[in-house]
Amino acid sequence: MFKLNYAEMDKKFKVYIYLDGDPNTFYQTPRKLTGKYASEGYFFQNIRESQFHTDDPDQADLFFIPISCHKMRGKGTSYENMTVIVQNYVENLISKYPYWNRTLGADHFFVTCHDVGVRATEGVSLLVKNSIRVVCSPSYDVGFIPHKDVALPQVLQPFALPAGGNDIENRTTLGFWAGHRNSKIRVILAQVWQNDTELDISNNRINRATGHLVYQKRFYRTKFCICPGGSQVNSARIADSIHYGCIPVILSNYYDLPFNDILDWRKFSVILKENDVYQLKKILKDISHAEFVDLHNNLVKVQKHFQWNSPPIKYDAFHMVMYDLWLRRHVIKY
């Protein structure tokens, strides 16, 4: 069914991009294609490179609002001013064009892979209520609506090392995590497990002085990589784990996982609630070798879906996001 729907999307789906806004400020073009928020940049670039882009709004299934909160962040714009800028831009589109008013914005979407982008747009009720929000921090407890909004994978590209996989014999460490303790669950994870002999849990980020790419290389020798939420529910560590062939252990509440209505995450990851952190080692050790092999083999199969490319490639992250948008094209005509 997915392949049939994907083929139809590939042939028919069209998106109109509003032309308003100076590319030298906050609009139209990405800030950059690297770093934690590269997914936003890649989408801005990929949509223009793809066959989905149409210059004819009458042919469009959806309308893209090309405003970049990442570029605002880069220019030091405050949260309050971001909200004003977003609101003024959207209100200008509403008054200038007839397309928003046909559905009250239900066939419009914007993309932001920055927590400040979510905060900036939360102040614009029209966007939150009606339009499709494609965001990297899709948390149920801050207004994310799964049947309307889309979870954007946060992918830290370019990857420092090649993809892992089909290397089970090299994975001798049970579990691994290292990072900033910038959330309650990360603090608990470090406190409970940092001295464990089977779980490789660091109390902070790995110092680069310890060696070249030490952090990335640990993914290669680990079976399960722990992915607790940070300042938001999401973590770029999930995509890192998938790329390096390490089974991601999702340790976050209220997280609508990327492509959740396409992929069965339980076939290539371990999904836990934050309260499960105290039983973490037992849960992982109770997974049989055969179950681990199945998870690992399935993980290798989905790696292509969590990779951005320029120009985009069939079934990559861009096309998966477009497929999620395609599923939401049948909007309510208010």
Image (cartoon, rainbow, N blue to C red):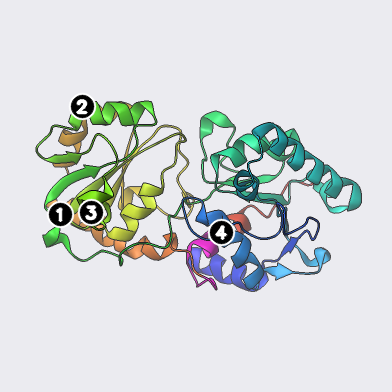
| Span of residues in magenta | 310-320
- At label 3, counting other C-alpha atoms closer than 10 Å, the crowd grade (few under 14, some 14-19, many 20 or more) is few
Which of labels 2 and 3 is toward the front?
Answer: 3
* Residue bearing the label numbered 4: 32
Q: Secondary structure at mark 2?
A: helix
- The location of residue 311, given as percent across then percent down, is 55, 73
The local secondary structure at tag 4 comes to: loop
Marks 4 and 2, how far apart at CA: 38 Å
Instruction: Looking at the image, tell me whether mark 1 or mark 4 is earlier in sequence order.
Output: 4
Q: Is residue 334 above or below residue 183?
A: below
Image point 66% across, 60% down: which residue? 29
Residue most extreme to the left: 197
- Residue 218, placed above or below residue 309: above
Q: Marks 3 and 4, Cα distance to the nearest angstrom? A: 26 Å
Our reading of the magenta stretch's main secondary structure is loop
Q: Amino acid at mark 2?
A: Val
Closest to the observer, 317 or 117 = 117
